[in-house]
Image (cartoon, rainbow, N blue to C red):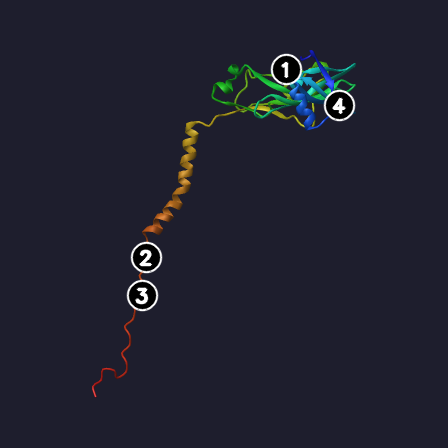
């Protein structure tokens, strides 16, 4: 379970907008905002190197941060980190305040294990992952690092649903109206199947080809011969 709280020092921003954001980045700081929990948004800046190191550690959006702004402390989770499309460096960050009840809505990654013990995969089946992440409600201090799914014994045709997981106490999926699918073990199309499909397609094409060939062999109808012009009355009679 991801229970570590990461402390960040931030400074409040008096000015907002593109000009103020560019100025902050020139000074080695990243503009950011803390919002949510029915409180006004707070514009801040954070040291760029510190934020970048936290991002590179992984699980950035499931880490709980304690952000100090002056004498105030804000507990929040990262919702987004925008990167420069050319330099691939952070340009802006969004943080969501944690409400007083301590519950957060977050996406937790899915991790599959023991794929080598799956009879279906050994026979050439394919793991079709429907959901790489599962969105859940959970206490901020008990955010799972991931949901582990054991593929031992999984055969071709098997489906893994949310009901297959043993979720920790206090963790509930946001989707409650159905037992949604996380992954399936699908059979791979064999060479014999491909040949059979090709044969069926060829059989279907034969009647059309026969019709086309018959049309090509049919002789063209001859045009009716032109009639000889009728002789003019008395034209050849001798006087």
Front tag of 2 and 4: 4
How far from the left and from the top, in percent, is residue 170? 72, 17
Q: Nearer the viewer, residue 16 or 74?
A: 16
Q: Is residue 15 visible?
A: yes
Cα–Cα span, label 2 and label 4: 90 Å
Cα–Cα span, label 4 and label 1: 22 Å
Q: Say which label, 2 or 4, has the lower sequence index.
A: 4
Cα–Cα span, label 3 and label 2: 12 Å
Q: Is residue 36 left or right of residue 202?
A: right
Front tag of 1 and 3: 1
How far from the left and from the top, in percent, is residue 155? 53, 20
Question: What residue is disc 4 on?
Answer: 14
Q: Are marks 4 and 1 in contact (CB under 8 Å)?
A: no
Which residue is drawn at the image coordinates 51% and 23% (left, top)?
A: 126
- In the rendered image, the quadrant that contains the N terminus is top right
Question: What residue is disc 3 on?
Answer: 224
Cα–Cα span, label 1 and label 3: 94 Å
The numbered disc on residue 220 is 2
How far from the left and from the top, in percent, is residue 215? 35, 51
How far from the left and from the top, in percent, is residue 188? 48, 26
Q: Residue furthest left?
A: 238
Q: Are marks 4 and 3 in contact (CB under 8 Å)?
A: no
């Amino acid at each position: 379970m991801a229970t570590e709280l990461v402390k960040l020092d931030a400074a409040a921003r008096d000015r907002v907008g593109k000009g103020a954001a560019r100025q902050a980045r020139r000074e080695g700081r990243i503009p950011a905002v803390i919002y949510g929990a029915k409180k006004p948004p707070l514009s801040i800046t954070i040291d760029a190197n510190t934020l970048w190191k936290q991002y590179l550690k992984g699980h950035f959006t499931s880490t709980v941060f304690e952000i100090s702004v002056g004498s105030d402390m804000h507990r929040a989770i990262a919702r987004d980190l925008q990167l420069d499309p050319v330099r691939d460096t952070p340009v802006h960050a969004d943080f969501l305040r944690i409400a007083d009840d301590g519950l957060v809505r977050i996406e937790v990654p899915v991790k599959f294990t023991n794929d080598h013990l799956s009879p279906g995969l050994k026979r050439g089946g394919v793991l079709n992952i429907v959901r790489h992440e599962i969105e859940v409600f959970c206490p901020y201090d008990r955010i799972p690092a991931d949901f582990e799914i054991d593929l031992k014994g999984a055969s071709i045709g098997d489906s893994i649903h949310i009901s297959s997981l043993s979720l920790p106490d206090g963790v509930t999926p946001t989707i409650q109206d159905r037992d949604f699918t996380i992954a399936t073990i699908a059979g791979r199309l064999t060479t014999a199947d491909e040949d059979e499909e090709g044969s069926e397609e060829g059989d279907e094409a034969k009647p059309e080809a026969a019709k086309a060939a018959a049309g090509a062999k049919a002789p063209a109808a001859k045009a009716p011969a032109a009639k000889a012009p009728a002789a003019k009355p008395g034209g050849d009679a001798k006087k």
